[in-house]
Image: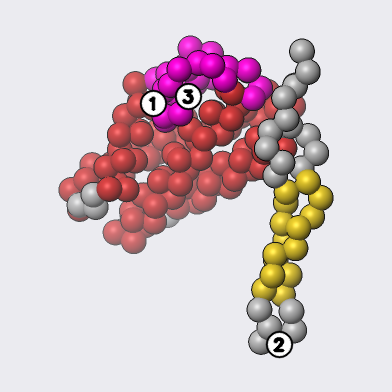
Amino acid sequence: MPRKKLKSYTSSKIKRSGAGGGASIVKESPLSHPNDYFVLILADFERAVSRLRESLSQPYSETVRDSSLMRFEFTSELSWKVLRIYLKEDLKLKDVEGLNSPKGVFREAFKQGLIEDEPFWLETMDNRNLIVHTYKEEVAEKIYPTLPRVLSLCQDLLAVLKERKDD
């Protein structure tokens, strides 16, 4: 069965004009392979995981905690989005119910053997929502100690997706 193309995404670069000039976006060639969008999001996820690891390697302080929580937010957001793209486009699961919500994506990823510890992933999404929508010191202190485990699971997920991408 022929592979259905993703939307026509293009990569862009910012071109700066001379001294004091503004910036403009210069369109490059369209992404040619249906898997290109997955590859781009996977690269973003890899950078996010790296930045979370970097933040968690620092000695604890409130600034480090807050930075780590911010990095946790975008790492967890990218984790479910890259999984959703992989499930829909590479595994052809477009008609599976629930792939438009983070928890639905993680449930399906667990069924497909892409992730382990489904309850922790679901708890991670709950924690992400707590941090994003209500910032309280006690919530930050509760969630911060879970971040090394989140990092470990994200690193495992990244390894699985990179391996499957190369297949």
- Mark 2 vs mark 3: in front: 3
Whole-angstrom CA distance, mark 2 to mark 3, is: 47 Å
State which region is magenta: 89-118
Sooner in the amino-acid sequence: mark 2 or mark 3? 2
Residue 86 shows up from this direction: yes
Q: Does residue 111 show up magenta in the picture?
A: yes
Quadrant including the N terminus = top right
* Residue at the spot 41% in from the left edge and 35% down from the top edge: 150
Find disc 3 in the rendering and name its residue: 99
Give yes or no for residue 117 being in the magenta stretch.
yes
Residue 93 rendering spot, x and y as whole percentages: 57, 17
The residue that mark 1 highlights is 103
Pointer 1: residues within 10 angstroms few (<14), some, or many (20+)? many
- At x 50%, y 16%, the residue is 96
Separation of marks 3 and 1 at Cα, in angstroms: 8 Å
Residue 90 lies in quadrant: top right
Q: Report the disc number at residue 19.
A: 2
Q: How many labels were placed on the picture?
A: 3
In-image side of 79 versus 144 (left or right): right
Whole-angstrom CA distance, mark 1 to mark 2, is: 48 Å
Q: As shown in the figure, which amino acid type bears the numbered disc 3?
A: Leu
Q: Which amino acid lies under the numbered mark 2 shown in the image of this protein?
A: Ala
> Which SS class for mark 1?
helix
Q: Residues within 10 Å of mark 2 (few under 14, many from 20)?
A: few
